């Protein structure tokens, strides 16, 4: 009996030892799949779900199975820690697979390594029974890794602050004819007075200056707001007529176009301005009356009731409103860009802050730009020049200098915050970059936000943010491809850039249009790096070019 038991134990041991080989022989009956079937790189990682179906009577109840997901790529391979499963009789803490058959699904995760775009995912199995183990045939479950999102243009958009330089400066020059109360007669003393003389001198100076042009002239007559409104309106009309006659007299021998003539009537606007600028006691009471009543008669009556105040008005304010204004509307043609460049070389001191900012914007040489911005900072403590200098450094790839320059900008507005976001983007600090771009709210920040959203796999929002006309053409097209909006992506792809042609080739490949793939890639291959990429791009698997 004892001998029989020994033979039985030996037989059972033999079966156990044979089970790994049996599982290896039956491995072709095991089915495996990967979702997605083509691996996709998102935000620098590869995530997928692998499912393995073990048929009935395959999984021996007495074994442990180790399954190791491995990506094999050009230049190497990357393996995860194995998943471990056990048969129903094994006393361990691994996931149990029933002898009667079972489907097992696992999440896989890899960090992207350059070269993985041309790769495949396989599952390597090892069956362990006691001290014996045997490797199962490797199962290939996915081919290639899609890296289309990496085509994003990620340099970041930053805009220089504009200057306020005026190519044409508009101004007015004027003289005044004052009248006595209830009179429309022009006194000779007024025609020979300082105000009219200065006005005529301004006309002569404009005529002598080739940069200055008198575009139009006006006469505007008024009456002070005292007495009956109807009477004052008539008085204002008479003053406009007498001022028009006086104009012809005083401008004789001077270059002056015929003026347009206008009669305003009671000058409540001028009255309010003069009162506000005066030192009259209780002037706030007068201003309150003006705000409370719109009827001229009521206004005047309320003000007359303040006898002391009205006395002051009669002496300081009302005489100034009995007038006709002689006005010349003048345009001064400022220095052209070419003249500014010449002045920069020969007479830099005459350039103010706005002129320096303008000339910096038209100068092509970056060393000169840097010098001009530094001069504007030194001479005018220009915050805009400080910001623009940082942008210059940023565009040159001098991020450390750009960061230091931005720190000196006093007003951290949307432009500054956007530039800080671009610096964070360059450091792959996507969280900080996204926060900056959302906060900045500028058009440049919207485009940059779309870039970050693509890089972090937030494709749906990226497509919304980059919707034309806000987004740049390239990244807009890319976001639409990544959200499978292929028809819309093709309509948006209107830029003549090789990278956009490459994106159009991807659209054609996904739509199964072989001829369009070839035609678009021929244009894209003007950029040699895109030809190198296309060779390994899973988007073009099965296409010849």
Image (spheres, helix red, strand yellow):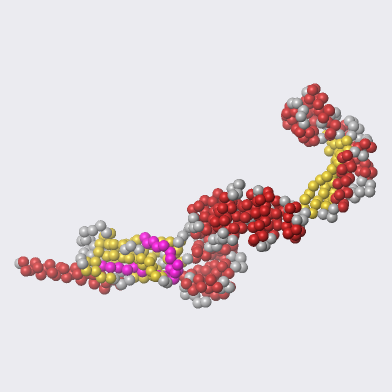
x and y, in percent, of residue 432 in the image: 50, 52
Q: Is residue 58 above or below residue 280?
A: below
User: Hey, which quadrant is residue 101 in on the image?
Assistant: bottom left
Number of numbered labels in the structure image:
0
User: Above or below — where is 528 with respect to 208?
Assistant: below
Taking the spot 82% from the left edge, 49% from the top edge, the residue there is 330
- Magenta residue check for 439: no
Q: In the image, residue 391 lies at what x, y percent? A: 60, 56
Residue 337 visible = no
Furthest-bottom residue in this view: 544
Quadrant hosting residue 402 = bottom right
Residue occupying image coordinates x 61% and y 47%: 411
**In the shown orientation, is residue 444 left or right of residue 2?**
right
Which span is picked out in magenta? 107-127
Depth check: give the residue in front, 234 or 416: 416
Observer-nearest residue: 448 or 125? 448
Residue located 49% across and 55% down the image: 429
Q: Nearer the viewer, residue 193 or 393?
A: 393
Q: Main secondary structure of the magenta part?
A: strand
The quadrant of the rendering that contains the N terminus is bottom left
* Left or right: where 307 falls relative to 154: right
Instruction: Identify the residue at image location x=78%, y=25%.
Output: 309
């Amino acid at each position: 009996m004892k001998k029989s038991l020994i033979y039985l134990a030996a037989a059972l041991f033999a079966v156990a030892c044979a089970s790994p080989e049996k599982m290896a022989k039956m491995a072709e009956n095991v089915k495996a799949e990967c979702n997605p079937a083509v691996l996709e790189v998102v935000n620098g990682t590869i995530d997928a779900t692998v499912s393995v179906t073990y048929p009935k009577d395959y999984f021996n109840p007495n074994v442990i199975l180790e399954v190791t997901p491995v990506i094999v790529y050009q230049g190497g391979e990357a393996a995860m820690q194995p998943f471990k499963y056990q048969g129903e009789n094994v006393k361990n803490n691994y996931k149990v697979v029933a002898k009667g058959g079972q489907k097992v699904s696992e999440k896989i995760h890899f960090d992207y390594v350059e070269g993985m775009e041309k790769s495949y995912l396989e599952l390597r199995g090892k069956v362990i029974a006691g001290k014996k183990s045997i490797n199962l045939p490797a199962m290939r479950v996915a081919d290639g890794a899609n890296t289309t999102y990496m085509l994003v243009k990620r340099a970041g958009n930053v805009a220089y602050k504009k200057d306020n330089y005026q190519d044409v400066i508009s101004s007015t020059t004027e003289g005044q004819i004052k009248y006595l109360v209830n009179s429309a007669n022009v006194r000779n003393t007024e025609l020979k007075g300082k105000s009219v003389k200065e006005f005529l001198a301004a006309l002569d100076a404009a005529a002598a200056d080739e940069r200055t042009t008198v575009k139009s002239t006006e006469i505007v007559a008024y009456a002070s707001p005292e007495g009956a409104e109807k009477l004052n309106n008539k008085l204002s009309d008479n003053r406009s007529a007498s001022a028009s006659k006086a104009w012809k007299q005083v401008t004789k021998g001077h270059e002056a176009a015929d003026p347009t003539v206008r009669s305003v009537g009671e000058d409540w606007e001028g009255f309010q301005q003069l009162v506000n600028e005066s030192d009259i006691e209780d002037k706030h009471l007068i201003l309150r009356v003006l705000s409370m009543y719109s009827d001229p008669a009521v206004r005047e009556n309320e003000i007359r009731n303040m006898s002391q105040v009205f006395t002051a008005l009669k002496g300081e304010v009302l005489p100034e409103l009995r007038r006709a204004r002689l006005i010349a509307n003048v345009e001064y043609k400022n220095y052209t860009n070419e003249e500014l460049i010449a002045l920069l070389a020969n007479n830099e001191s005459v350039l103010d802050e706005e002129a320096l900012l303008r000339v910096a914007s038209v100068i092509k040489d970056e060393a000169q730009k840097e010098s001009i911005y530094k001069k504007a900072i030194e001479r005018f403590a220009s915050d805009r020049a400080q910001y623009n200098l940082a942008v210059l450094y940023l565009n040159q790839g001098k991020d450390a200098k750009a960061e230091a320059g931005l720190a000196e900008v006093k007003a951290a507005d949307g432009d500054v915050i956007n530039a800080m976001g671009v610096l964070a983007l360059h450091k792959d600090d996507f969280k900080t970059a996204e926060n900056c771009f959302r906060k900045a709210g500028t058009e440049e920040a919207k485009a940059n936000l779309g870039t970050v959203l693509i890089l972090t796999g937030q494709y749906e929002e990226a497509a919304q943010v980059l919707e034309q006309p806000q987004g740049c053409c390239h990244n807009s097209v890319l976001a639409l491809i990544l959200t499978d909006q292929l028809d819309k992506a093709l309509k948006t792809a209107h830029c003549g850039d090789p990278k956009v042609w490459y994106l159009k080739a991807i659209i054609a490949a996904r739509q199964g249009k072989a001829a369009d793939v070839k035609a678009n890639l021929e244009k894209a291959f003007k950029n040699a790096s895109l030809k190198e990429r296309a060779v390994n791009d899973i988007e073009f698997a099965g296409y010849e070019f």
